[in-house]
Amino acid sequence: MIPNDPYLLTPGPLTTSLSVKQAMLHDWGSWDNDFNQLTAEVCTRLLRVAGGENSHVCVPMQGSGTFAVEATLGTLIPRNSTTLVLMNGAYGQRISKILDRLGRRCLAIDKGDYHPPRGDEVERTLRQHPEIDQVVVVHCETSSGILNPIPEIAGVCQKAGKHLIIDSMSAFGALPVNVAELPCAALISSANKCFEGVPGFGFAIVDKTLLSESEGQCHSLSLDLHDQWRYMEKSGQWRYTPPTHVVAAFLQALREHEAEGGVAGRLARYSRNRDRLVAGLRELGFQTLLADEWLSPIITTFLSPDSPDFDFPRFYEAIKARGFLIYPGKLTVAESFRLGCIGQLHDEQIDAVVAAIADACQSLGMPVPVPPPAAAPDNLENH
């Protein structure tokens, strides 16, 4: 850590290691072979983590994770095709909005703020709408922190002969996934999530046959994933100016990911962070939105207490003053806030943020334990 930097309990950007930061202190020529080798190693490592070495290709895309999502949807989905979007939060809704902007027809199973889409619902919808060609789902919907049942959904798609596209922005790198075994037509993620890099590019891990058949489908010049892939295959270079410093930092982050034990090691630490965080805040009287079986190791939503002294902006600033940044809620059904479990956070930081939250509550005039929420939505125990 840099002294006086706050710890980020957010789903990305997140707290990175000092060595990842230091990897950005060197300048790279964007067409130089040394930088091309960095890009190639990044793609090779990501394919290995995804289990797609023999079936898929990895295509990085400049910009935020949403750039990579739009590039993948716009490239892989034909203009006369119909897509089923599984929604249970803001990021599923964003996928639908992207498809609408692209003029691609889509249907939706909308589960509201926090219920999971289930395999039987998907199967029923595919049977009712045989025109659907692909299904898109968010792996971990960070609006609520729910981890969606991807293997269950993938099995239904495989049986029905439909392509599955997974927005695994906040899950890949910490949750095990094998794109060849699922199977999965494309998986999309970003540098600044569970691999603990910095923001600047996303990437898609795409079935090679499907991508090779997508020439000319994309709505955009700069977001054409097929053209990006072909150009990289031919030259080893990005088509347009790459985020050189970010790529160098990400390669360092990938090496640290491997040294921690890869997906299994990162999942173990993030799960411990979540369990420690949830236990600590429950002792303070806070309630989680989700039942334990649906809590992801990525981010957890806590319901706001029923107290006239609780005001999220003041609560946020009080915690920030104690060295931590948290996330506002993103629900329509209840007031809430969110705490991330990912990034360079360990037992010491989790214990410290719990103490900071207790101290912040008392400074705002709230008793501890805090009053329970006024009208909590029913949790997911029966869903």
Image: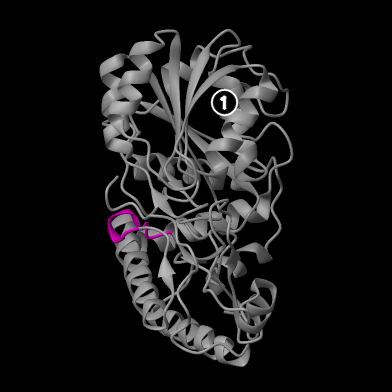
Q: Residue at x 41, y 79 (%)?
A: 285
Q: Give how far across and how far down residue 97 sits, in percent.
A: 64, 30
| Image position of 327 with respect to 40: above or below | below
Give the residues drawn in magenta, as a range: 291-298
Q: Residue at x 42, y 48 (%)?
A: 172
Q: Give how far across and how far down residue 270 sits, in percent.
A: 37, 65
Q: Is residue 176 magenta?
A: no
The answer to whether residue 325 is visible is: yes
Callout 1 amino acid = Leu
Q: Quadrant of the C terminus?
A: top left
The image quadrant of residue 152 is top left
Per the picture, the main secondary structure of the magenta-coloured stretch is loop
User: Residue pushed farthest front?
Assistant: 374
Q: Give how far across and how far down residue 181 sits, in percent.
A: 26, 31
| Image position of 235 with respect to 197: above or below | above
The image quadrant of residue 273 is bottom left
| Image position of 13 with respect to 34: above or below | below
Q: Tell me the residue that label 1 is attached to.
A: 73
SS category of the residue bearing label 1: helix
| Image position of 127 with respect to 52: above or below | above
